[in-house]
Image: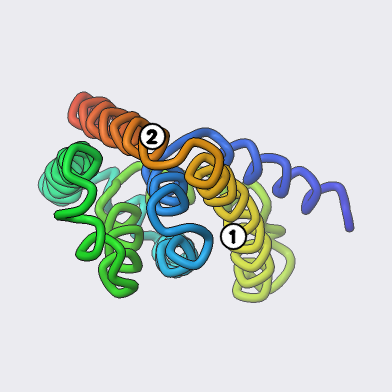
């Protein structure tokens, strides 16, 4: 592996390992449904990576940064959805029997993780800023974007699986009480992320 790809992997690992919405969902899903219950969410986040990288390769990140209207629409959709999920996680922790089955439907878990990523403008701007630094302009760009996408998705799958495993361990070791507290923590953290996104300003605004 050349130094450029190694640098990209380290950057991707640092970015993914920092707790964000999809990682918090993987942790919470593991606590509620074990590894099997967390898999659909992990797949949804991986699909969102592919979409965001494709968007960045097509220049959507630059368009988002330049358009106040588009930036605002994506931003506030993300804020509303993150806050909604945070409240759902807190409510689910308080009423585990009433909400657990609905929350753990595979399609619901998949869509939740996917939508969390694609409604967050930070993702588009992150890839728009990161990927060009690892693209050699003398080589075909499409192939390089495919390689970077594959590396990022593989890293994301690994890190989220580890977080889901931590959640699963808390479920087995601490029982329902630990699961409830972890659900509250993830919900509050999600609301905190929503708050930080609400304060985010478009570059140059």
Q: Where the N terminus falls, by quadrant?
A: bottom right
Label 1 belongs to which residue? 157
The front one of 2 and 40 is 40
Q: Position of residue 132 (x, y in %)?
A: 58, 51
Residue at left 63%, top 36%?
14
Vertical position of residue 75 compared to residue 160: above or below: above
Residue at left 53%, top 46%?
172
Q: Earlier in the sequence, mark 2 or mark 1?
A: 1
Vertical position of residue 139 compared to residue 12: above or below: below
Colouring mode (rainbow / by chain / secondary structure / one colour): rainbow
The front one of 127 and 160 is 160
Q: Position of residue 76 (x, y in %)?
A: 13, 42
Vertical position of residue 107 compared to residue 4: above or below: below
The front one of 109 and 92 is 92
Residue at left 35%, top 68%?
110
Label 2 belongs to which residue? 182
Q: Does residue 152 appear in this view?
A: yes
Residue at left 67%, top 75%?
143
Q: Position of residue 129 (x, y in %)?
A: 49, 43
Label 2, secondary structure: give it.
helix
For residue 187, side relative to residue 155 (left or right): left
Q: Position of residue 6 (x, y in %)?
A: 80, 48
Answer with the quarter of the image where residue 194 lies.
top left
Q: How many numbered discs, if any?
A: 2
Residue farthest right in this picture:
1
Q: Where the C terminus falls, by quadrant?
A: top left
Q: Given contact means CB atoms under 8 Å apart, are the residues at marks 2 and 1 in contact?
A: no
Which mark lies nearer to you, 2 or 1? 2
Label 1, secondary structure: give it.
helix
Q: Does residue 75 appear in this view?
A: no
């Amino acid at each position: 592996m050349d130094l450029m790809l190694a640098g990209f992997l380290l950057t991707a690992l640092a970015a993914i390992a920092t707790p964000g919405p999809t990682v918090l969902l993987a942790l919470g899903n593991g606590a509620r449904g074990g590894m099997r219950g967390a898999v659909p969410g992990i797949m949804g986040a991986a699909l969102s990576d592919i979409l965001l990288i494709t968007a960045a390769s097509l220049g959507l990140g630059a368009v988002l940064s330049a358009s106040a209207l588009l930036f605002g629409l994506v931003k506030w959709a993300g804020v509303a959805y993150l806050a909604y999920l945070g409240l759902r996680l807190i409510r689910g922790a308080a009423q585990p029997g009433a909400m657990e089955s609905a929350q753990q439907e595979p399609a619901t878990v998949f869509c939740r993780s996917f939508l969390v990523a694609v409604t967050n403008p930070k993702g588009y701007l992150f890839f728009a800023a990161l990927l060009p630094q690892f693209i050699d302009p003398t080589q075909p760009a499409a192939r390089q974007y495919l390689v970077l996408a594959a590396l990022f998705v593989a890293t994301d799958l690994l890190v989220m699986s580890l977080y889901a495993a931590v959640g699963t361990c808390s479920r087995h070791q601490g029982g329902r009480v630990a699961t409830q507290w972890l659900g509250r923590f993830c919900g509050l953290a999600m609301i905190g992320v929503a708050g930080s996104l609400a304060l985010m300003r478009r570059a140059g605004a």
